[in-house]
Amino acid sequence: MTTDASDTAPKPPVLTKRDIGKDAHSGEPLVVLENVNKHFGALHVLQDIDLTIHRGEVVVVIGPSGSGKSTLCRTINRLEAIDGGRITIDGNLLPQEGRELARLRSDVGMVFQSFNLFAHKTVLQNVTLGPLKVRREKADVVTRRAHELLDRVGVGSQADKYPAQLSGGQQQRVAIARALAMEPKVMLFDEPTSALDPEMINEVLEVMRDLAREGMTMVVVTHEMGFARSAANRVIFMADGRIVEENTPDEFFSNPRSDRARDFLSKILHH
Amino acid sequence: MLEVIQDNWDLLQDGFVGTLKLTVVCGIASLLLGTLIAACRVSPVPPLRWFGAAYVNLFRNTPLTLIFFAVALGFPKLRFNFSFFQFAVIALSTYTAAFICEAIRSGINTVPIGQAEAARSLGMSFTQTLSQIVLPQAGRAAVPPIGSLLIAMVRNSAIASAFNTTELMGTSSTMIENGYKSLWVLVWIAIGYLIITLTMSALLAALEKKLAVVR
């Protein structure tokens, strides 16, 4: 009897958003790459990539340099065009260059290794520019949201400064706020802490952890194994343009299946 | 030497105003046209890029006098009946724009590629990326060469006198024919050009300072 069963069954644990994220594989597919191929001249940087990222999932992409992980990240909003295969975001095929692509990109937040804040605009203008120019939202609404976002990433007091006046960590947090201002469906992080001084890495990772906790769908290319362990639902290991291994972080780090991954982990974890 | 300007004040003034008008109108026209051609040259649309490259190669490599001839003799044949001043503006602007385009393009190349990538990933169109992000930052690097080009344009405007346009250089022949010493005539004309070009240099230097972007 179903009623009896439910009476005797242990109460399910209270789910936090984080836990829902953990089970996100049951969520619907948001970003789907099918048989994606990409060449840089003679170099085959992406080889037959199949990858599905579900809503609310945090996927960390790791691998040696030159493995194609940054390129993979950049193909998702077509900063790099692909030679073959297909990419869909929320069911829509990634269009060719033009208005359609611009609209789709506005739903995909991107955070770069080198921050790429607009050097001639203030911190606040950096955050408001997208909603104002791309979405044509009202200025007062956008400004209020921008201030909230800047407070949330901890740089609220820097709103009127120019990017060059901020530390690297602060700049990267502004860049995250700028991407969030577009209220994206998914956030792409292309080595967001690789250009930072060691003492600034954590302040950026903390913001990213918060985002993950709140259920944001994230693709993170990084060398920060601590972040991968603590925030990822899934780890993708890439080498030579291929996805060599994908697994939960616990499984991947404690029990890597491929020689390539074991070799990579032994180089970065034990010193 | 002073009698040259005392006796010919009206003539010199007309010439000075003529050159000044050519400078302002051609300066604005060639900056606008040059920016437009530069936008074509960096556009993602191949035919626009081809057009931009063809324009620059055609006008940069043709002697200005030839362009003046083509406009002054060709346009009336096509039943475009403009004034001589308008012919001069067309010839001088289309020619100068080819050089300005390349100066702006070199300015665009100084802007890190990440700036445009960030703009595109926010969903900005090509036009928005160029006008909001790239060109404002390209300006600073482009101003010094543009300054040189505009000064060259002022001096090139002297050619217009051969095509019935009232301007500074053209006043010299009238004065010399009237028996004034050519040395002093030319000194005063040189001073007239210097007033225009030095003022322009000062304005551009101020602009360069204003456009400074700290990285």
Image (cartoon, coloured by chain):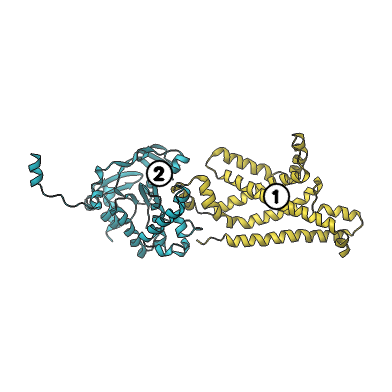
Chain colours: A cyan, B yellow
> Looking at the image, can residue A116 be seen?
no
Dot 2 crowding, Cα within 10 Å, few <14, some 14–19, many 20+: some
Q: Is A213 drawn above or below residue A93 in the view shown?
A: below
Where's residue B44, x and y in %? 52, 42
Where's residue B91, x and y in %? 72, 44
Left or right of A159, for residue A257? left
Q: Secondary structure at mark 1?
A: helix
Where's residue B208, x and y in %? 60, 60
Q: On the rendered image, what quadrant is the C terminus of chain A found in?
A: bottom left
Q: Is A172 drawn above or below residue B166 in the view shown?
A: below
The residue wearing badge 2 is: A75
Q: Residue at the location (53% across, 60% down)?
A: B213
Q: Nearer the viewer, residue B92 or B127?
A: B127
Label 1: chain letter: B
Left or right of A133, for residue A90? left
Label 2: chain letter: A
> Looking at the image, can residue A2 be seen?
yes
CA–CA distance in space, label 2 to label 1: 44 Å
Q: Secondary structure at mark 2?
A: helix
The amino acid type of the residue labelled 2 equals Thr
From the image, state whether disc 2 or disc 1 is nearer to you: 1
**Residue that lies at the very extreme toward the top in this rendered image:** B78
The residue wearing badge 1 is: B26
Mark 2 vs mark 1: same chain? no
Q: Within the image, what quadrant is residue A225 found in?
A: bottom left
The amino acid type of the residue labelled 1 equals Cys
